[in-house]
Image: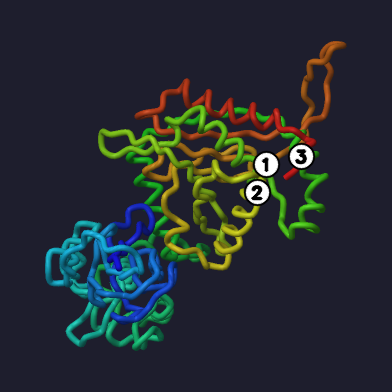
Amino acid sequence: MALKEVFLPKMGESVFEATIISWLKKEGESIDPYESLVEVATDKVDTEVPSNYGGILKKRLAREGDVVAIGKAIALIETPEEEDNTDDIPTPSQDREPLTAGAKTSNGNGNSNGGAIPLKARSQSGRFYSPLVRKIAQDEKVKLQELESIEGTGKGGRVTKNDILNYIKTRPKSSVEPDVMLQKAHAISEVTGDDEIIEMDRMRKIIAQRMVESVHIAPHVQSFVEADMTHIVKWREKMKEVVKRELNQNLTYTPVIIEAIVMALREFPALNASVDGEKIIIRRRINIGMAVALPDGNLIVPVIRDADRLSLLGLTQRVNELAERARKGKLSADDLSGGTYTVTNVGSFGSLLGTPIILQPQVAIMATGTIVKKPAVLETAEGDVIAIRHKMFLSHSFDHRIIDGAMGSLFAKRVAEILEKFNPNRSL
Protein backbone atom coordinates (compact mmCIF):
# COMPACT_ATOMS: atom_id res chain seq x y z
CA MET A 1 0.00 0.00 0.00
CA ALA A 2 1.14 3.58 -0.59
CA LEU A 3 0.03 7.00 0.59
CA LYS A 4 -0.57 9.64 -2.07
CA GLU A 5 -1.13 13.35 -1.45
CA VAL A 6 -4.02 15.21 -3.07
CA PHE A 7 -3.11 18.86 -3.62
CA LEU A 8 -5.39 21.87 -3.95
CA PRO A 9 -5.20 22.66 -7.69
CA LYS A 10 -4.82 26.06 -9.33
CA MET A 11 -8.20 27.70 -9.73
CA GLY A 12 -7.72 30.66 -12.03
CA GLU A 13 -5.37 33.59 -12.41
CA SER A 14 -4.76 35.62 -9.22
CA VAL A 15 -6.40 32.98 -7.00
CA PHE A 16 -4.01 31.94 -4.25
CA GLU A 17 -6.23 30.18 -1.73
CA ALA A 18 -9.57 28.48 -1.30
CA THR A 19 -11.89 27.67 1.59
CA ILE A 20 -12.90 24.11 2.39
CA ILE A 21 -16.71 24.16 2.27
CA SER A 22 -17.53 20.50 2.82
CA TRP A 23 -15.86 17.12 2.54
CA LEU A 24 -17.69 14.74 0.23
CA LYS A 25 -15.89 11.68 1.60
CA LYS A 26 -15.26 10.52 5.16
CA GLU A 27 -11.96 9.14 6.40
CA GLY A 28 -11.91 5.42 5.76
CA GLU A 29 -14.24 5.62 2.75
CA SER A 30 -13.17 4.39 -0.66
CA ILE A 31 -12.83 6.78 -3.58
CA ASP A 32 -12.35 6.28 -7.30
CA PRO A 33 -9.84 8.18 -9.46
CA TYR A 34 -11.25 11.60 -10.45
CA GLU A 35 -14.23 11.19 -8.12
CA SER A 36 -15.14 14.41 -6.27
CA LEU A 37 -13.43 14.58 -2.89
CA VAL A 38 -14.17 17.99 -1.44
CA GLU A 39 -16.15 21.16 -2.22
CA VAL A 40 -14.15 24.39 -2.05
CA ALA A 41 -14.82 28.08 -2.67
CA THR A 42 -12.74 31.02 -3.85
CA ASP A 43 -13.68 34.64 -4.37
CA LYS A 44 -14.48 33.74 -8.00
CA VAL A 45 -16.16 30.36 -8.02
CA ASP A 46 -17.41 27.43 -5.94
CA THR A 47 -16.26 24.06 -7.27
CA GLU A 48 -15.49 20.45 -6.42
CA VAL A 49 -11.95 19.05 -6.29
CA PRO A 50 -11.52 15.45 -7.50
CA SER A 51 -9.05 12.91 -6.20
CA ASN A 52 -6.13 12.09 -8.46
CA TYR A 53 -5.99 8.56 -7.09
CA GLY A 54 -8.26 5.67 -6.29
CA GLY A 55 -8.14 3.99 -2.90
CA ILE A 56 -9.09 4.81 0.69
CA LEU A 57 -9.28 8.33 2.14
CA LYS A 58 -6.76 7.88 4.94
CA LYS A 59 -6.60 11.40 6.32
CA ARG A 60 -8.21 14.78 5.66
CA LEU A 61 -5.55 17.47 6.16
CA ALA A 62 -7.91 20.43 6.50
CA ARG A 63 -11.15 21.09 8.30
CA GLU A 64 -14.34 22.54 6.88
CA GLY A 65 -14.02 26.32 7.01
CA ASP A 66 -10.21 26.31 6.78
CA VAL A 67 -8.55 28.51 4.15
CA VAL A 68 -5.87 26.54 2.28
CA ALA A 69 -3.18 27.86 -0.05
CA ILE A 70 -3.18 26.68 -3.65
CA GLY A 71 -0.73 23.81 -4.07
CA LYS A 72 -1.02 22.58 -0.46
CA ALA A 73 -1.88 18.96 0.32
CA ILE A 74 -5.46 18.55 1.53
CA ALA A 75 -5.77 14.77 1.84
CA LEU A 76 -3.91 11.48 1.89
CA ILE A 77 -5.18 8.60 -0.21
CA GLU A 78 -4.07 5.04 0.52
CA THR A 79 -3.63 3.36 -2.84
CA PRO A 80 -3.13 -0.35 -3.65
CA GLU A 81 0.48 0.20 -4.68
CA GLU A 82 3.87 -0.52 -3.16
CA GLU A 83 4.74 1.32 0.04
CA ASP A 84 6.26 4.76 -0.47
CA ASN A 85 8.46 6.86 1.77
CA THR A 86 5.63 8.59 3.65
CA ASP A 87 6.45 8.21 7.35
CA ASP A 88 3.87 9.95 9.47
CA ILE A 89 0.37 11.04 8.63
CA PRO A 90 0.21 14.77 9.40
CA THR A 91 -2.86 16.29 10.96
CA PRO A 92 -4.36 19.74 10.34
CA SER A 93 -2.68 20.97 13.53
CA GLN A 94 0.82 19.88 12.51
CA ASP A 95 3.27 21.20 9.94
CA ARG A 96 0.64 21.15 7.19
CA GLU A 97 -1.73 23.40 9.08
CA PRO A 98 -3.65 25.50 6.53
CA LEU A 99 -3.95 29.23 6.58
CA THR A 100 -6.56 30.35 9.09
CA ALA A 101 -9.56 32.33 8.00
CA GLY A 102 -8.24 35.34 9.80
CA ALA A 103 -4.90 35.28 8.03
CA LYS A 104 -3.91 37.82 5.42
CA THR A 105 -5.65 36.86 2.21
CA SER A 106 -4.56 37.18 -1.40
CA ASN A 107 -5.86 40.73 -1.66
CA GLY A 108 -3.59 41.66 1.20
CA ASN A 109 -6.06 43.80 3.09
CA GLY A 110 -7.47 41.42 5.70
CA ASN A 111 -10.64 43.00 7.05
CA SER A 112 -10.04 46.60 5.98
CA ASN A 113 -13.55 47.29 4.74
CA GLY A 114 -14.83 48.71 7.97
CA GLY A 115 -16.80 45.67 9.12
CA ALA A 116 -18.81 45.16 5.96
CA ILE A 117 -17.95 41.45 5.97
CA PRO A 118 -17.09 39.06 8.82
CA LEU A 119 -13.43 38.87 9.81
CA LYS A 120 -13.55 35.08 9.70
CA ALA A 121 -15.20 32.68 7.31
CA ARG A 122 -17.32 31.38 10.20
CA SER A 123 -19.18 33.98 12.27
CA GLN A 124 -19.73 33.85 16.03
CA SER A 125 -23.09 32.22 15.41
CA GLY A 126 -21.25 29.34 13.72
CA ARG A 127 -22.49 30.16 10.24
CA PHE A 128 -20.02 29.66 7.37
CA TYR A 129 -19.56 32.17 4.53
CA SER A 130 -17.54 31.24 1.44
CA PRO A 131 -14.90 33.61 0.00
CA LEU A 132 -17.18 34.28 -2.97
CA VAL A 133 -20.05 35.37 -0.71
CA ARG A 134 -17.72 37.45 1.47
CA LYS A 135 -16.18 39.12 -1.60
CA ILE A 136 -19.64 40.10 -2.87
CA ALA A 137 -20.53 41.33 0.60
CA GLN A 138 -17.37 43.42 0.70
CA ASP A 139 -18.01 44.95 -2.73
CA GLU A 140 -21.63 45.74 -1.88
CA LYS A 141 -20.95 46.91 1.71
CA VAL A 142 -23.17 44.23 3.23
CA LYS A 143 -22.66 44.07 7.00
CA LEU A 144 -22.35 40.93 9.08
CA GLN A 145 -25.75 41.38 10.69
CA GLU A 146 -27.28 41.55 7.21
CA LEU A 147 -25.53 38.35 6.16
CA GLU A 148 -26.82 36.63 9.28
CA SER A 149 -30.38 37.57 8.31
CA ILE A 150 -30.19 36.05 4.81
CA GLU A 151 -31.92 32.70 4.46
CA GLY A 152 -29.41 30.34 2.88
CA THR A 153 -30.38 27.70 0.34
CA GLY A 154 -27.03 25.91 0.32
CA LYS A 155 -25.97 22.83 2.21
CA GLY A 156 -26.74 23.19 5.91
CA GLY A 157 -28.37 26.56 5.30
CA ARG A 158 -25.19 28.04 3.80
CA VAL A 159 -25.62 31.37 1.99
CA THR A 160 -24.87 30.87 -1.70
CA LYS A 161 -23.89 33.39 -4.36
CA ASN A 162 -27.48 33.53 -5.65
CA ASP A 163 -28.79 34.05 -2.12
CA ILE A 164 -26.70 37.17 -1.50
CA LEU A 165 -27.25 38.54 -5.03
CA ASN A 166 -31.01 38.15 -4.62
CA TYR A 167 -30.80 39.89 -1.25
CA ILE A 168 -28.87 42.81 -2.74
CA LYS A 169 -31.55 43.26 -5.42
CA THR A 170 -34.27 43.68 -2.76
CA ARG A 171 -32.07 45.21 -0.07
CA PRO A 172 -33.75 47.99 1.91
CA LYS A 173 -32.10 51.37 1.42
CA SER A 174 -31.83 51.85 5.17
CA SER A 175 -29.23 49.07 5.33
CA VAL A 176 -26.81 50.84 2.98
CA GLU A 177 -23.96 52.62 4.77
CA PRO A 178 -24.26 56.43 4.99
CA ASP A 179 -21.09 57.10 2.96
CA VAL A 180 -22.39 54.89 0.16
CA MET A 181 -25.72 56.73 0.27
CA LEU A 182 -23.88 60.06 0.00
CA GLN A 183 -21.80 58.84 -2.93
CA LYS A 184 -24.89 57.67 -4.78
CA ALA A 185 -26.73 60.88 -3.98
CA HIS A 186 -23.81 62.93 -5.28
CA ALA A 187 -23.70 60.89 -8.49
CA ILE A 188 -27.43 61.23 -9.02
CA SER A 189 -27.26 64.99 -8.51
CA GLU A 190 -25.05 65.23 -11.61
CA VAL A 191 -27.48 63.61 -14.04
CA THR A 192 -30.76 64.76 -15.51
CA GLY A 193 -34.20 63.20 -15.37
CA ASP A 194 -33.75 61.85 -18.89
CA ASP A 195 -30.77 59.70 -17.87
CA GLU A 196 -30.89 56.06 -16.81
CA ILE A 197 -28.64 54.82 -14.01
CA ILE A 198 -27.60 51.17 -14.13
CA GLU A 199 -25.56 49.51 -11.41
CA MET A 200 -22.66 47.35 -12.62
CA ASP A 201 -23.16 43.67 -11.91
CA ARG A 202 -20.40 41.80 -10.11
CA MET A 203 -18.81 40.33 -13.25
CA ARG A 204 -18.70 43.73 -14.92
CA LYS A 205 -16.94 45.15 -11.85
CA ILE A 206 -14.35 42.37 -11.99
CA ILE A 207 -13.81 42.88 -15.73
CA ALA A 208 -13.39 46.63 -15.20
CA GLN A 209 -10.84 46.08 -12.45
CA ARG A 210 -8.84 43.55 -14.51
CA MET A 211 -8.77 45.79 -17.59
CA VAL A 212 -7.54 48.83 -15.63
CA GLU A 213 -4.88 46.69 -13.94
CA SER A 214 -3.68 45.29 -17.27
CA VAL A 215 -3.31 48.70 -18.92
CA HIS A 216 -1.52 49.98 -15.82
CA ILE A 217 0.87 47.00 -15.72
CA ALA A 218 1.74 46.54 -19.39
CA PRO A 219 2.48 49.16 -22.07
CA HIS A 220 0.20 47.99 -24.89
CA VAL A 221 1.35 48.19 -28.51
CA GLN A 222 -0.84 47.13 -31.45
CA SER A 223 -0.01 45.71 -34.85
CA PHE A 224 -2.57 45.17 -37.63
CA VAL A 225 -2.46 42.90 -40.66
CA GLU A 226 -5.06 41.82 -43.21
CA ALA A 227 -5.47 38.15 -44.10
CA ASP A 228 -7.05 36.70 -47.24
CA MET A 229 -9.55 34.16 -45.89
CA THR A 230 -10.99 33.12 -49.27
CA HIS A 231 -9.70 29.53 -49.18
CA ILE A 232 -10.99 29.09 -45.61
CA VAL A 233 -14.40 30.60 -46.39
CA LYS A 234 -14.89 28.27 -49.35
CA TRP A 235 -13.67 25.28 -47.36
CA ARG A 236 -16.06 26.00 -44.51
CA GLU A 237 -19.01 26.42 -46.87
CA LYS A 238 -18.20 23.02 -48.32
CA MET A 239 -17.63 21.27 -45.01
CA LYS A 240 -20.06 22.75 -42.48
CA GLU A 241 -23.12 20.68 -43.48
CA VAL A 242 -21.05 17.50 -43.63
CA VAL A 243 -19.59 18.16 -40.19
CA LYS A 244 -23.01 18.93 -38.75
CA ARG A 245 -24.59 15.82 -40.25
CA GLU A 246 -21.81 13.30 -39.60
CA LEU A 247 -20.20 14.66 -36.43
CA ASN A 248 -22.98 16.79 -34.93
CA GLN A 249 -20.55 19.69 -34.59
CA ASN A 250 -20.85 23.35 -35.59
CA LEU A 251 -17.97 24.37 -37.83
CA THR A 252 -16.87 27.96 -37.22
CA TYR A 253 -13.78 29.92 -38.17
CA THR A 254 -12.50 29.96 -34.57
CA PRO A 255 -10.72 26.56 -34.53
CA VAL A 256 -9.03 27.32 -37.87
CA ILE A 257 -7.75 30.64 -36.50
CA ILE A 258 -6.60 29.01 -33.25
CA GLU A 259 -4.74 26.38 -35.27
CA ALA A 260 -2.89 29.13 -37.16
CA ILE A 261 -2.04 30.97 -33.94
CA VAL A 262 -0.70 27.77 -32.38
CA MET A 263 1.51 27.14 -35.42
CA ALA A 264 2.87 30.69 -35.21
CA LEU A 265 3.49 30.40 -31.46
CA ARG A 266 5.77 27.44 -32.12
CA GLU A 267 7.90 29.76 -34.27
CA PHE A 268 7.63 32.70 -31.84
CA PRO A 269 7.79 31.13 -28.35
CA ALA A 270 8.43 34.52 -26.72
CA LEU A 271 4.76 35.36 -27.36
CA ASN A 272 3.69 32.29 -25.37
CA ALA A 273 4.97 33.74 -22.12
CA SER A 274 4.18 35.61 -18.94
CA VAL A 275 5.96 38.16 -16.77
CA ASP A 276 6.70 37.64 -13.08
CA GLY A 277 8.28 40.80 -11.70
CA GLU A 278 11.57 41.09 -13.60
CA LYS A 279 11.46 37.51 -14.87
CA ILE A 280 10.12 36.29 -18.21
CA ILE A 281 8.56 32.83 -18.12
CA ILE A 282 8.44 31.08 -21.50
CA ARG A 283 5.58 28.59 -21.40
CA ARG A 284 6.26 25.22 -22.99
CA ARG A 285 2.59 24.27 -23.05
CA ILE A 286 0.35 26.19 -25.43
CA ASN A 287 -2.97 26.88 -23.71
CA ILE A 288 -5.22 29.17 -25.75
CA GLY A 289 -7.74 31.38 -23.99
CA MET A 290 -10.90 31.91 -26.05
CA ALA A 291 -13.10 34.89 -25.22
CA VAL A 292 -16.79 33.95 -25.18
CA ALA A 293 -19.67 36.43 -25.08
CA LEU A 294 -22.28 35.59 -22.45
CA PRO A 295 -26.02 36.20 -22.76
CA ASP A 296 -25.79 39.14 -20.34
CA GLY A 297 -23.21 40.88 -22.55
CA ASN A 298 -20.18 40.09 -20.40
CA LEU A 299 -17.16 38.12 -21.58
CA ILE A 300 -15.49 35.07 -20.09
CA VAL A 301 -12.29 33.34 -21.24
CA PRO A 302 -12.20 29.54 -20.98
CA VAL A 303 -8.91 27.87 -21.87
CA ILE A 304 -8.14 25.20 -24.47
CA ARG A 305 -5.29 23.32 -22.83
CA ASP A 306 -2.50 21.85 -24.95
CA ALA A 307 -4.05 23.28 -28.09
CA ASP A 308 -0.92 22.33 -30.06
CA ARG A 309 -1.68 18.65 -29.46
CA LEU A 310 -5.20 18.80 -30.89
CA SER A 311 -6.20 18.18 -34.49
CA LEU A 312 -8.52 20.59 -36.25
CA LEU A 313 -11.39 18.28 -35.35
CA GLY A 314 -10.24 18.22 -31.74
CA LEU A 315 -10.07 22.02 -31.67
CA THR A 316 -13.56 22.23 -33.19
CA GLN A 317 -15.00 19.94 -30.54
CA ARG A 318 -13.24 21.75 -27.70
CA VAL A 319 -14.27 25.20 -28.95
CA ASN A 320 -17.91 24.15 -29.20
CA GLU A 321 -17.87 22.43 -25.82
CA LEU A 322 -16.36 25.37 -23.93
CA ALA A 323 -18.56 27.93 -25.66
CA GLU A 324 -21.69 25.94 -24.80
CA ARG A 325 -20.70 25.45 -21.17
CA ALA A 326 -19.74 29.12 -20.85
CA ARG A 327 -23.14 30.31 -22.05
CA LYS A 328 -24.89 27.91 -19.66
CA GLY A 329 -22.73 28.99 -16.72
CA LYS A 330 -21.22 25.52 -16.29
CA LEU A 331 -17.51 26.30 -16.55
CA SER A 332 -15.28 25.09 -13.71
CA ALA A 333 -12.42 27.04 -12.16
CA ASP A 334 -9.99 24.77 -13.98
CA ASP A 335 -11.55 25.76 -17.32
CA LEU A 336 -10.57 29.39 -16.68
CA SER A 337 -6.97 28.94 -15.56
CA GLY A 338 -3.61 28.32 -17.17
CA GLY A 339 -4.01 30.34 -20.37
CA THR A 340 -0.78 31.33 -22.14
CA TYR A 341 -2.19 33.31 -25.11
CA THR A 342 -5.69 34.62 -25.84
CA VAL A 343 -7.80 35.20 -28.94
CA THR A 344 -11.01 37.22 -29.11
CA ASN A 345 -13.40 37.54 -32.05
CA VAL A 346 -14.60 41.13 -32.36
CA GLY A 347 -15.84 40.26 -35.83
CA SER A 348 -18.78 38.37 -34.34
CA PHE A 349 -20.18 41.80 -33.43
CA GLY A 350 -19.54 43.25 -36.89
CA SER A 351 -16.27 45.03 -36.04
CA LEU A 352 -13.50 45.25 -38.62
CA LEU A 353 -10.80 45.97 -36.05
CA GLY A 354 -10.30 45.89 -32.32
CA THR A 355 -7.54 46.80 -29.87
CA PRO A 356 -7.86 44.08 -27.23
CA ILE A 357 -6.44 44.41 -23.72
CA ILE A 358 -3.95 41.76 -22.61
CA LEU A 359 -5.15 39.21 -20.07
CA GLN A 360 -2.52 39.33 -17.33
CA PRO A 361 -0.03 37.80 -16.78
CA GLN A 362 0.09 36.87 -20.47
CA VAL A 363 2.04 39.09 -22.85
CA ALA A 364 -0.17 39.20 -25.95
CA ILE A 365 -3.69 38.81 -27.32
CA MET A 366 -5.11 38.71 -30.85
CA ALA A 367 -8.47 40.01 -32.05
CA THR A 368 -10.05 38.84 -35.29
CA GLY A 369 -12.36 41.10 -37.25
CA THR A 370 -15.38 40.31 -39.39
CA ILE A 371 -14.75 38.70 -42.78
CA VAL A 372 -15.85 40.93 -45.66
CA LYS A 373 -15.75 40.74 -49.43
CA LYS A 374 -13.59 43.38 -51.11
CA PRO A 375 -11.71 43.89 -54.39
CA ALA A 376 -8.06 42.90 -54.26
CA VAL A 377 -5.15 42.82 -56.67
CA LEU A 378 -3.92 39.30 -57.45
CA GLU A 379 -0.70 38.42 -59.20
CA THR A 380 -1.15 35.81 -61.94
CA ALA A 381 1.02 34.37 -64.71
CA GLU A 382 -0.83 36.63 -67.16
CA GLY A 383 -0.37 39.72 -64.99
CA ASP A 384 -2.17 41.46 -62.17
CA VAL A 385 -5.96 41.15 -61.94
CA ILE A 386 -8.62 42.53 -59.64
CA ALA A 387 -10.77 39.89 -57.95
CA ILE A 388 -13.32 39.68 -55.13
CA ARG A 389 -11.69 38.18 -52.04
CA HIS A 390 -12.75 37.47 -48.45
CA LYS A 391 -10.60 39.61 -46.17
CA MET A 392 -10.18 39.76 -42.37
CA PHE A 393 -8.11 42.05 -40.14
CA LEU A 394 -5.99 40.66 -37.32
CA SER A 395 -5.28 43.03 -34.42
CA HIS A 396 -2.35 42.02 -32.23
CA SER A 397 -1.82 43.68 -28.83
CA PHE A 398 1.42 42.88 -27.05
CA ASP A 399 3.35 43.86 -23.94
CA HIS A 400 6.07 46.24 -25.05
CA ARG A 401 8.10 45.58 -21.90
CA ILE A 402 9.36 42.32 -23.39
CA ILE A 403 7.99 42.17 -26.97
CA ASP A 404 9.41 44.73 -29.36
CA GLY A 405 7.54 46.08 -32.35
CA ALA A 406 9.35 43.91 -34.87
CA MET A 407 8.53 40.63 -33.16
CA GLY A 408 4.93 41.63 -32.43
CA SER A 409 4.37 42.63 -36.05
CA LEU A 410 6.13 39.61 -37.54
CA PHE A 411 4.02 37.27 -35.41
CA ALA A 412 0.78 38.82 -36.67
CA LYS A 413 2.08 38.66 -40.25
CA ARG A 414 2.96 34.98 -39.78
CA VAL A 415 -0.53 34.13 -38.53
CA ALA A 416 -1.97 35.81 -41.64
CA GLU A 417 0.40 33.85 -43.90
CA ILE A 418 -0.64 30.55 -42.36
CA LEU A 419 -4.32 31.40 -42.82
CA GLU A 420 -3.76 32.37 -46.46
CA LYS A 421 -1.94 29.10 -47.19
CA PHE A 422 -4.80 27.00 -45.80
CA ASN A 423 -5.44 23.94 -47.97
CA PRO A 424 -9.06 24.16 -49.23
CA ASN A 425 -9.05 20.44 -50.00
CA ARG A 426 -8.08 19.23 -46.53
CA SER A 427 -10.35 17.17 -44.31
CA LEU A 428 -11.29 18.10 -40.80
The Cα–Cα distance between marks 2 and 1, rounded to whole angstroms, is: 6 Å
Number of on-image labels: 3
Residue nearest the observer in this picture, 163 or 266 = 266
Q: Tell me the crowding category of disc 2: few under 14, some 14 to 19, or many 20 or more residues within 10 angstroms, Cα based.
A: few
In this view, 359 is above or below 186? above
Expressed as whole percent of the image width and height from the top left, the position of residue 312 reads: 65, 44
What residue sits right under mark 1 in the picture?
370
Expressed as whole percent of the image width and height from the top left, the position of residue 9 reads: 35, 59
What residue sits right under mark 2 in the picture?
348
The secondary structure type at the circle numbered 2 is helix
Give the position of the N terminus as an image quadrant.
bottom left
The Cα–Cα distance between marks 3 and 1, rounded to whole angstroms, is: 12 Å
User: Residue drawn at (63%, 56%), measured in percent from left and top?
Assistant: 320
Q: Is residue 102 left or right of residue 31?
A: left
Residue nearest the observer in this picture, 304 or 50 = 50
Say the numbered circle drawn on residue 400. Answer: none
Residue, far front: 82
Give the position of the C terminus as an image quadrant.
top right
> N-terminal of the two: label 2 or label 3?
3
Residue nearest the observer in this picture, 251 or 206 = 251
What residue sits right under mark 3 in the picture?
233
Expressed as whole percent of the image width and height from the top left, the position of residue 121 reads: 23, 75
> N-terminal of the two: label 2 or label 1?
2
Check contact, mark 2 vs mark 1: CB within 8 A: yes
In front: label 3 or label 1: 3
Q: Tell me the crowding category of disc 3: few under 14, some 14 to 19, or many 20 or more residues within 10 angstroms, Cα based.
A: some
In this view, 69 is above or below 427? below
Residue nearest the observer in this picture, 55 or 347 = 55
The Cα–Cα distance between marks 2 and 3, rounded to whole angstroms, is: 15 Å
In this view, 104 is above or below 238? below
